[in-house]
Image: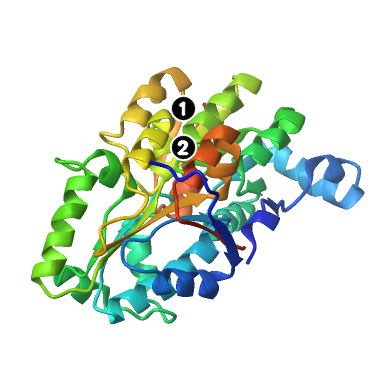
Amino acid sequence: MAKAQAPDIFSGNAMDIAQKLYESEGGSHYLVLYHDLVTYREMYSHYIKAALSNNEIVLVLPFYETIDSVRQILSEDSACIDVRKREKEQSLLIIDGLKGYFGLPNGLMSFTKQLAEYAKTSGKNCVSIIGDMGPFFYNRKKDNLIGWELELPFRYHPCMKGFCVYHEKDFGKRLPENDKELLIGHHEQVLDLAA
Amino acid sequence: MAESNSSYTGTYRNVSKAKSNGKDSKINNKNTDNKKHIVAMVVDDDIDICNLTRMALQKQGFDVYGFTDPLLALEHFRANCDSCNIVISDLRMPAMNGIEFLVNIKKVKPTTRVLLMSAFAIEGDPEYARLFKQTKINGFIQKPVSMRHLTQTIKSHIKQ
C-alpha cells in the first residue's frame, strides 16, 4: 500500500543520482525521473559499473533505446564494462522494456523472483532492477501502470532494489495529477535527474 | 548536452526567408526548376540521430527541420504544413509515440507523406499492428539505415 507521507525528492546530476542509488539499502524502491537520454545513459553507466563491482546482479529494462545501444554505452570509456562477459555470467541482464513488462512467459515479477533466488544461491549481494516505465505509455497500458506500480511493495525483499524510471515527458505530460501523487507516494524516494 | 533545450535542432535553409533573398532564392529556384524541392521534417528523441539525419539530408539539398520533441514538432507543423512535403518520425518517443504523432500530422494535412523509422523490430508489435492500417503511414524505415537508402526512400515517396 502507498504510504500517505510524501517521500523526499532529491535532485542531482548523473553522478549524484548514481551515488544515491548505489548507497540505497537492499529493499529500496525508488522513482527516478530523467529529462534526457544522454544524462540518463551517463547515470546508469556509473550506477551499473558500481553495482557490478559490488557483486550485484543488474537487470536493465530500457525502452527509448535498443538493448544494443545499452550494451554499447556500457562498453564505452566511462563505464568500460565487459558486457559480453557480464551477460554470460548472468550478472548483467538487458531486456527490452516492452518484452520485459508485457512479453515474458510468466511475467516480470516471477522473473525477478527467480533472479533473487539465483542471487542467493550464487553468492551475489543483491539484484538491482532499473526499469524504464515507457512501455506503459507506448502500449496503451497507461491505465495498467498504476495497478502495476501499486502491486509492487513499498519496500522490496532485502536482496532486491527496484528503480522505476520515468522520462519526465511521460510522467509530467501523460499522467493526471492524482496518478502522479499516487506514484510518488508509493515510492520511498523520488530522484530527479537534472539534464 | 541538454536535450530539453535543443528540441528544435535547426534547418539548413528557411524556405520563406530564401524566397525573399536574391541569392538564396536563385538556389531555391534552381532546385525547383530541375526537380521538386523537398522540405522534410525529422523527429527523433535521440538528438544525435536527429542531427545526423538532418545534416545528411541537407547535404542532399533538402530543407530539413529537426525536432527531438514530437509536441513541438506538431506545433511547428500546424503553423508550416503547407511548406512541408514529408515527415519522418522515430517510433519510440516520450510524450507522444511516433504513430500517435503521425496520426496527428495526417489530421492536420492528410496529403502529407509520412514515414516511420525505428531501430526496433515492428513484427509482432501490437501497437504498431493496431494503428498501422488506420494511420495510413506511407512507409517504414528500419534503422540503422544508410543515408543513401533514406534519401532514395524519401525521393520515391515524394514522386508518388
Observer-nearest of B88 and A108: A108
Q: Amino acid at mark 2?
A: Leu
Observer-nearest of B97 and A116: A116
Q: Residue at x 63, y 67 (%)?
A: B1
Residue A83 location, quadrant? bottom left
Residue at the spot of label 1? B137
Q: Position of residue A101 (x, y in %)?
A: 29, 43
Q: Earlier in the sequence, mark 2 or mark 1?
A: 2
Counting other residues with Cα less than 10 Å from the Cα at mark 2, is it few (<14), some (14-19), or many (20 or more)? many
| Label 2 residue SS | strand
Tell me: residue A6, above or below residue A14: above
Q: Residue at x 51, y 69 (%)?
A: A17
Residue that extends furthest to the left in the rendered view of this protein: A121
Q: Position of residue A27 (x, y in %)?
A: 32, 61
Q: Does the rendering let one see residue A123?
A: yes
Q: CA distance from mark 2 to mark 1?
A: 7 Å
Counting other residues with Cα less than 10 Å from the Cα at mark 1, is it few (<14), some (14-19), or many (20 or more)? some
Residue at the spot of label 2? B116
Q: Which mark is residue A1?
A: none
Tell me: residue A78, above or below residue B73: below
User: Is label 2 in contact with label 1 (beta carbons under 8 Å)?
Assistant: yes
Observer-nearest of A60 and A31: A31
- Chain hosting mark 2: B
Q: Position of residue B69 (x, y in %)?
A: 62, 45
Residue A90 location, quadrant? bottom left
Q: Amino acid at mark 1?
A: Ile
